[in-house]
Structures are given as structure tokens and as C-alpha cells.
Amino acid sequence: MSARMRAVVLALLAVAAVATTAGAAIASTPPDAGGDLVLAQGGETVRGVLRDGEGEPVPDVAISVATPDGEVVGETATDADGAWEVGLPAPGDYVVTLDAETLPEGVDLRDADRNPLEVTVRSAQNRTLIFALGEGAGGSRFLNSFLAQAVSGLRFGLIIAITAIGLSLIFGTTGLVNFAHGELVALGAIIAFFFNAPASVGGFGLTLILAGLIATVLSAAAGGAIELGLWRPLRKRRTGLIQMLVISIGLALLLRNALQVWFGGGSRPYYDYTIQQSLVFGPIRITPRDLIVMALATIVLVGVATMLQRTRIGKAMRAVSDNRDLAESSGIDVQRVILIIWVIGGGLAGFGGVLAGVVENVSYLMGFRLLLLMFAGVILGGLGTAYGAMFGSIVVGLITELSTLWFSTELKYVWALGVLILILLVRPQGLLGRAERIG
Amino acid sequence: MPETPAARVLADVEPRPGVPKPDPILVVDSVVRRFGGLKAVDVEHLEIQRGAITSLIGPNGAGKTTFFNLMTGFDRPDHGSWSFDGHDLSRVPAHQVANYGMVRTFQLTKALTRLTVIENMKLGATSQRGERFLPSLWPGVWRSQEREIEARADELLARFRMDHMRGELGGTLSGGQRKLLEMARALMVDPAMVMLDEPMAGVNPALTQSLLQHVKDLPGFGKTVLFVEHDMDVVMDISDWVVVMAQGRIISEGPPAAVAKDQAVIDAYLGADHGDESRFTPVSFEASAAAARRHDQEESA
Amino acid sequence: MDVDFTRVLVDGLRTGLGPVAAVYALAAIGLNVHYGYTGLLNFGQVGFMLVGAYGMGIAVSIHSLPLWLGIILGMLAAVALALLLGFPTLRLRADYLAICTIAAAEILRFVFRSSPMAEVTGGAFGIPSQVGGSGFSSGFYRLNPIPEGAYGIGPVMFSHTRLWMMLVAWLLVALAVVLVWALMRSPWGRVIKSIREDEDAARALGKNVFAYKMQSLVLGGVLGGVAGIVLVMNQGAMTPDQFLPQLTFFAYTVLLLGGAATVVGPVLGSILFWFILQAMDSLLRQTGFGSAALGAVRLAFVGLILILLMAFRPQGLLGNKQEMMLDA
């Protein structure tokens, strides 16, 4: 007993030493001060700057601030620079209303639901609020925001789909529920960030397109390396699936936090394509950046589907996923197929991470935030199938964004996760999966 | 042809599918189970005679195991009804079926690997008060009962010649020993009927003889036996009555000698894929034992 | 390099014996009931901790109920969550159950921190200890019978308030250990373990597997709820973002380190886990390691322990190697 214990303690100390030196070798990046909270001395205020869709300031718009009980505490109008500020009596909850009647011709709130705004102001906080303005659009307000949310839901769903294919195929071929898949997503996004960042901040200053390509390739390599260095040896040792699931959680913790040490705790945008003018298609407005993201995602998804359907390796993947023993006995090199799935899955995850980073921001946590949604998509479509993962992920993306039409934005992931649980309960084989024969 | 009391009673029963028996313990009516478009089980009527050894045979994929699963509540039929010893069993959960006195074993043995042999056995006992949450905290409530159960378990282990392994973990037993343990454990429930799913598969010849003897002894203890078996020598040796399934249906039933001559049965076996012909002749025990071991490994992997 | 190893050791010991280690021991004992004994892969233990803590906090701090009643309500909240989660999910396969439970715990966190719920739960800011003079932890510390001062052996010293916290927390751990020991040697424990081995076998022998799984889920969940209560009591405040999924992962590491399906494994695991983690922290700090990255290095290290444990010693420190081998 004691000898066993000693050996373990020694092993752990050795690990500690390795972790220490590894950690110390990587310089830490201070987290970004981002967000809309700016601390200042003195009393609490709410403030902001109104700009229209072209970025021009909008003056003479009336804004009022009230307590949640409806007691007005201050009123103001925007100045020539579009700026406004209202002093508050104390920290607490306030309701800020923009008087849409005072907006000039042709300018309208882009999201009518975001007026009035409910805010919580902390002690000594000068809270900045944004009323997004744009061209006044005709037609029903609800229809407009419905379309807007549907587009961003589709965009989100496409990104989830790209990242989730690998997760689903890995489960289909090896039975592994890989909790570390999200980290490949963050890895891709972060690699692209450093290749994209200018030399002055320690990057290579490449265009995002090139940086994204490199990130995809490196993530694919990382996927292959994880398979060869970890999972294949574990499978050879006949490690149980539950054990492997727990190991994948350990791997996720390790990778995610190594990424944090590397990238820092904050979230940062890419240096390219940050500010863009929206294109307007009837009631839908979309930036060229988002349009390209969606087009790229669609092309990649169609490409993957074609590969699975037409190519030898794609057919082999589906065969292994369908029935591993049968595939093995019909002469398919299963280990090689699994390796290729890891490489492709890793590359897709990394690519999805780059797209997610373009649309939102890059952070070390972005993969973990996506993971449960990936699971939701994969399970919704039917675990182990690539097409199911694509379909389910898009549904999850749509649910997430469309829910904000009726419910609080803070709860948007709740609906997606709720659907995940619901599907597991009523149709665990997924919407597209087949019922398995029992006994 | 065995000369058991049950065989004598059944000698007067006409050998045709769905025939009524003088004293049935299990009565099945129009039970259907579909998987996709396939009717895995489609049994119009079947009665199992109390106190007899009935064997259920048929080519692979005939639906025998699915039929077991349906009868014991491990699977639900699309429709149909069946009753056991006066209890209507449709929609009764599996554990309740066992408590009514119908206990099954599994084709792939389910020895509880990280429990010792004696713990495996004691688990079979029913109505142990200490199995309820709050009473379990007060040993006074269950200790005396536990002693009785343990004595009964030891007795059964001795009968199955496994008493020397009572402290071993279930996972260390050989495939054949697991089969023995599973049967002995089923008897701990003190059931009126035991359903054995391929109890001889993967068991070495020496153990097969003793297992067979245990099965033959069961009617003497007042038990009814229904078992699935592929080895026709075994079936001929110990059955009082044979039921033949093919493609989900009962195609023949009768005393062993009558069934062996039934043209429908021969056709079913020959018509099925040729691998199954070997089932008619005793297969090499080594080969089947190896196959069973592979099976077990796959299952636990 | 000037490293004071006594300091490292003292820091490690203070944390290894401290209330947080007791909290994780409790949560891991609950997981041990779920995973170690019953085979339920609950990855939402932190959800039970959350509802336990908030059940108590809302009752005591917002509705000014007495502390003892708040604690009972916190435990009842854990029972309610177990029933709500268990009825639909206990029939699922192990890996699906894992995904389902982690999703449920995240749903709880999102809902509790959302502003529509702020009136009930305090939203993202949570419940501070002092609300209208009836803070939950001040009530707890008022019960402290230990005279003011510092206590300890040599350099390992604790203040009287911390000692009181530790005393209560470890007492609860001891109670939980005795409870699990008593249950697992009984026929009830035998049925529970048989379900872990093969639930169909247990079912075929007449055991109501669903009912037993539910009892196990409730028992382990309540232990998780108590862990949550002790956690926020020690911190004096609660916010939903204290209850991240990684708390569950920590608890699993603690359990697997000590040895799943052993009675004192989770306790030993927790003490050792926090000792190692804090000693490492102390060492890194003394070598001038930036504090920003320290938290991340610490978490990465936990991940590494988890991988190595599962790959090379899945039975943990106290588990039986032979039993583990049978599983593979």
C-alpha cells in the first residue's frame, strides 16, 4: 500500500514540476479591459453616443431615465456629437428610454425591442449604453427582427455544424464522447489570431485569410497528434469508454487552460474585418464579413458531404461509423480511417473556430461555450452521423437566436440545452437516426 | 426419450403449434414485436406446461431471445398479452415479473464482476428487508434474515459444486462457471419458472454434464423450465416438450422425437443460412467456448 | 532561488485541512454514491451544489427564515432536483446521462444568473451575506462556541472563525462517510453495486432498478447540496458563476484520486488534491510567477492529474487494482 502511494505521490510531484516549468516558460498576456464597463470616480451615470447606420452622430434625440417603478430621474437630449449622459442618484436598476419620435427622418432603431433598456448600475459606475440605429425599414417590426435573428441563427448554426462533424464522426467510429473537442475550436481561433496580429503585438501580421488557413492546417495536425499520442494508445490498452470520457474531460481542462496562459483571459477580435458596412437585401441587413462566413461554412459543409458520399475514404468513414466490425472484416484499415477522421475533425473544428472568431471575438473559452451546443446539435441530428450533426447544429443555432425574440438573451443557450435534454428523452437516436434493435 | 412425469402427461397432447396443455403456467396470446418492417416475434398462441422442461429451438434470428425479452418485461411488444401463473404480465416491468416467480438468465452471462460469488448469490434472495433504504441502516432489522439467506446460498453453491469459490470475485470466473453461477443465482429467487437463454453455450464438456443434471433436477424441486438451446443432443436428452420458432413464428411443437421428424422444422433449419446446419450436430465444444468468450469480451468492452 | 519550503508545506496543509477541502470531500462522496457505487455518470454535481446553496441562501437572506430551516430547504431543493432530473434521465445510457446532467447544471446556472430571475436569485450578482441584517453566514458564525483567538500546531494556525467552519465542515464529512459505510455494507448497498455491474441482471433478479437509482441520485445529490451550502457559508456570499462545470470535474478528480467505490477515498482524495494544488500555488508564487496565469496553470494541472489517473491508476489510491482490471 505505502509503496503504491509513494509511487503515485512521486509521479504527481514530477507532473507538478513539468507543469510549473511549462507554465513559467509561457509569458502571460494581460486580459483585455473590454466590455462596456468603465470605472470612474464620483457618482453613477448612464451615457452613450448615438450614431446612425453610416456612423454619423445623431443630435437632438430625447432620452429619459427612470427607476423601475417609473419615477423619472433625469432627461436629456443628444448634443451635436450625438453624445448624452444622465446623472443618477444612486447605484441600482434603471430603465432608459429613447424617444423614437425625436429621431430624424430615415433613421430608426435597428432593434425596437432594445428600447427601453433595463440596466443595473453599480457603485461609481459610468455605464455606457448603445441604442443601435439604422435606416428606417418598412414592414412589420417583428418580421424584421425575426429575419435578422434567423440570419444570425443560421450563421451560428453553420459554425456549430462545422465544428460538430468531427465530434459526431469520432463518436460514430470509436464510441468516444469527446469533451475536449471544443478546445480544438479555440485552438484554431487563437492560432489564427496570432498569425493575424501585427508584429508589434507579437504576431506575424498575415492577412486573416492566410492566418485562417494556417490555423486550419495546424488544428488538423493537432487532431491527428491527439489521436496518435493519446487515444490510439488508450484503445490499444483496452481502456473503457467511460474512462476515456473522463480522460477527455481532463484533456479539455489541460488544453483550455494552457490556451488561457498563452492567449490570456480576455476576449479579442481579429485585426481584420472588424468594422464593416451592412449590405441590405430587402428587410435583411448583413455585413459582407458575415455573408462570407456563411458562404464559406456552406461550401465546406457541402464539400464534406460530397467527400463522405463520393470518395473512397469518405465511404470508408461512413462504413466504419455504421458498423466497425463489419468494416474491419471487409478489409478497411479502421485505425487509419479513425486517424483521418481526427485530422479532418480537428481541421474542421479549427476552421469553425476561426469563423466564430470572425463573427464574435476570440477567447480561450469559446470552444467550451460551444461544446454543449455541439452536443445538442449532434444528438438532435443523431449521434455518429455527419449529416445528422449538420442538420441538428443548424436547428440548434436557429433555436438559440430565435429564442431571443420572445425571451431574455441571457437565456438563449438554455433553450438549446433544453432541446438537447428533451431529444435525449423522447428520441435518443436523434431526429435523423434509426431506432436500434434491442436484444 | 426421457421418462419424466411431465413427459408422460404431455404424451397425450397433440403435437401441433399452439396446442393447449393440461396445466399451463405461461399462456401467450398474439404477441407481436416489430423492428422496422420486420416481425421479429409473431406468436399466436403458446402454452408452457407447469413442471415440465420445455426447450425453445430455432435457427439464428428466429426471435427466441426477443421472445424471452418480451415475456420477462425486458422489451415491450407492439401488441399481445400473456399471463404467468394467473398474473397478467402485459406492461409489467421486468423486476415485477421476477417477483411473480419467473426468472431468466441471459445468453451473454451477467455475472456481477466486482461482487464475490456469495454476494452474487445473496442478491438473488427476495424480500430481504435490508434492501430498503432506511431499514438498511439498522443491521438489527436485516441481520438474522441475512444469515438465513447466506445459509441457503451456501447450500445452493454446494449443490452446484461452487462452494470452494464463494469468496472469489464474479469477474474471475470462467465462462462456464459464470453460467453455473447465473443459474444458481436465479434459483435464489425461488422462482416457479426459470427461463434459461443458452445455458450450455461456451461451457466445457465436464461442466455441461453437471449443468444438464442441474436442469434435469429442477422439475423435482417444483420448477418449470423453458430454455433456449442450439445443441440438439442436449435438447433431445432433457426436454419433455420442444417448441420450434422460425422467423418469429412457432412452426412446430411436440415431444422431442416428433419434432425431430417434422418436415417444417427440417425445412426451416435448411432454409436458414447454412451456418446453422451445424447446430443439428454437436458442434466442437472448444470452438463454441472460444466463441462465447469472444462474445463476453466484446460485451464488456 | 529563495523558496521557503516550510511555507509551501504550511500553505498546502492549511488548504488540505481547510473547509474547501471538506466541501469537495462532501461533493465527491456524493459522486461516489452516484458513480462509484451505482455507476451513474452524473456530470452535473455542481447543479446540486447550486440548488443547495441557493435554497438555503434565498430562504435565510431574502425571506429571513431561520438558518436551520434554510439548510433543510437547501437539502430539499437538492432532493427536488434529483427527482426532476432523475425521472426522465435515469433510463439513459451512461454517456448520454453525462451530457444530460452537465447540460442541466448549466441550464440552472444560466437561469439563476439571468435578470428575469434577479428578484428571486439576485441575478448575476447573487446573494451577498448581508441582506437586511439577516445574512446566512453571520447567523452561522454567531453559533461559534470557540473563544476568539488563533489555534493550531506550530506554523499551521487557524483563526477561531475558520476553525469553527472547519470543525462543522469536517464533522459533516465524517457523518457522510459513516452513512455511506453503513449503507454500502448493507443489502441495500449490495443491490446498488449490482446495478453498477449490470442493471439488467439486477432487474432479472427482481430488483426495482429505477427506484434504487433514484434513491442513489437523491442521496448523492443531497450530499452535493450540503457541499454547496458549506461552500457559500465559508465564502459568505453566493453567485451563480461560482458553480461552473469545472467544480464537478474537480470533484471527479478528487474521487478518482482517492479511489472510487471506497468509503474514505473521496476524503483522502480531497485532502491530497487541495494539498498538492495549494503547495504548487505557493511554490509558483514564491518563484515570482504571475498571478494572472496562476489560476489557469492550476486548472491545467487538474486536467493533467485527471488524465494520468484515468490512464494509469483508474482505481485511485485506495481502490483495488484487481477489481479495476475486471472492468476492462
Image (cartoon, grey):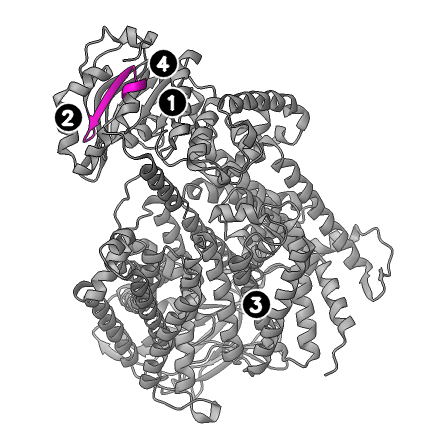
Residue that extends furthest to the bottom in the rendered view of this protein: A200
Residue indicated by mark 2: B266
Q: Element at badge 1?
A: helix
Name the residue at 49% across, 23% down.
Answer: B188
User: Which residues lie in the magenta part?
Assistant: B236-250
Height in image: C280 above or below C245?
below
Residue nearer the viewer, A288 or C215: C215
- Please state the horizontal and vertical placement of residue B173, each as a whole percent of the image: 48, 37
CB within 8 Å, label 3 to label 1:
no
- Mark 2 vs mark 4: in front: 2
Query: Could you say which disc has been placed on residue B212 in the image?
Result: 1
Rendering quarter of residue A29: bottom right
User: What is the spatial separation of the Cα atoms under label 1 and label 2, in whole angstroms?
Assistant: 25 Å
The three-letter code of the residue at mark 4 reads: Gly
Report if the CB atoms under discs 1 and 2 are less than 8 Å apart: no
Amino acid type of the residue that numbered disc 2 sits on in the rendered structure: Ile
Residue A201 location (% of width, % of height): 48, 90
> Which residue bears the numbered disc 4?
B86
Which of discs 2 and 3 lies nearer the camera? The answer is: 2
The numbered mark, 2 or 4, whose residue comes first in the sequence reads 4
* Closer mark to the observer between disc 3 and disc 1: 1
Find numbered disc 2 in the image and state the secondary structure of the residue it sits on.
Answer: helix
State the residue position of label 3: C299
Q: Nearer the viewer, mark 1 or mark 4?
A: 1
- Do the CB atoms of the residues marked 2 and 4 lie less than 8 Å apart? no
Residue density around tag 3, few if under 14, some if 14–19, many if 20 or more, within 10 Å: many
Check disc 3 and give the amino acid type. Leu
Answer with mark 1 or mark 4, whichever residue precedes in sequence: 4
